[in-house]
Amino acid sequence: MAAVRGYQRWISPLSGPRCKYYPTCSAYALSAINIHGAIKGLILAVWRLARCNPWSNGGLDYVPLKGQWRPGPSERLTETELTAYWRALDAGQNGKANDIVETALAARKAEASAGPQHS
């Protein structure tokens, strides 16, 4: 993590904003390590760096939720839920972040099992 923070502080300002993704590759790396631990976080960060190239379209690419390799569930969270999730992670409240996701996904599952509502 110190290497990434060093990059953010000393090298990145010299090169200007170049990352095609949001969050930036360095922010992604820090989040991946924070969420998944050193080994899996590093694997995810290296995979992200490999995808950030001149032929990439870039775009939104959030770190997968804890216990997952792909960011799929974030597609099922509302913007408000995602914001709350990332704020909790940034504050170091991993348990709260996981609760937000579990509550949101349980709500989606309940909505799906209820089926369409007719008036």
Image: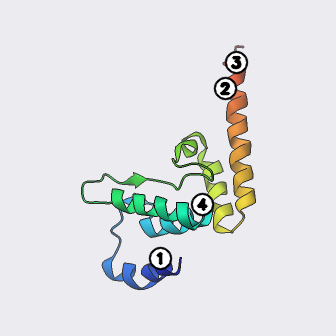
CA separation, marks 1 and 2? 41 Å
Residue at which label 4 appears: 36
Image point (70%, 61%), residue name: 94
Q: Position of residue 115 (x, y in %)?
A: 68, 19
Q: Which residue is mark 2?
A: 112
Residue type, mark 2 in image? Ala
Eye-nearest disc, 1 or 4: 4
In percent of width and height, residue 95 lies at: 75, 58
Q: Earlier in the sequence, mark 4 or mark 3?
A: 4
C-alpha gap between disc 2 and disc 3 = 11 Å
Q: Earlier in the sequence, mark 1 or mark 2?
A: 1
Residue 4 is marked as: 1
Q: Position of residue 13 (x, y in %)?
A: 38, 81
User: Left or right: 22 with respect to 115?
Assistant: left
Residue matched to label 3: 117
Estimate the spatial distance between the alpha carbons at disc 3 and disc 1, rounded to whole Å. 49 Å
Give percent across and percent down for residue 36: 60, 60
Q: Nearer the viewer, mark 2 or mark 3?
A: 2
Mark 3 vs mark 1: which is more N-terminal? 1
Label 3 neighbour load within 10 Å: few <14, some 14-19, many 20+:
few
**Which corner quadrant of the image does residue 109 belong to?**
top right
Q: Quarter-wise, where is residue 75 in the image? A: top right
The amino acid on which the numbered mark 1 sits, given as a three-letter code, is Val
102 vs 30, left or right, is right
Could you tell which of marks 2 and 3 lies nearer the N-terminus?
Answer: 2
* Residue located farthest toward the top when viewing the structure as drawn: 119
Q: Amino acid at mark 4?
A: His
Classed neighbour count for the residue bearing mark 4: other residues with Cα under 10 Å, few (<14), some (14–19), many (≥20)? many
Say above or below: 85 vs 37. above
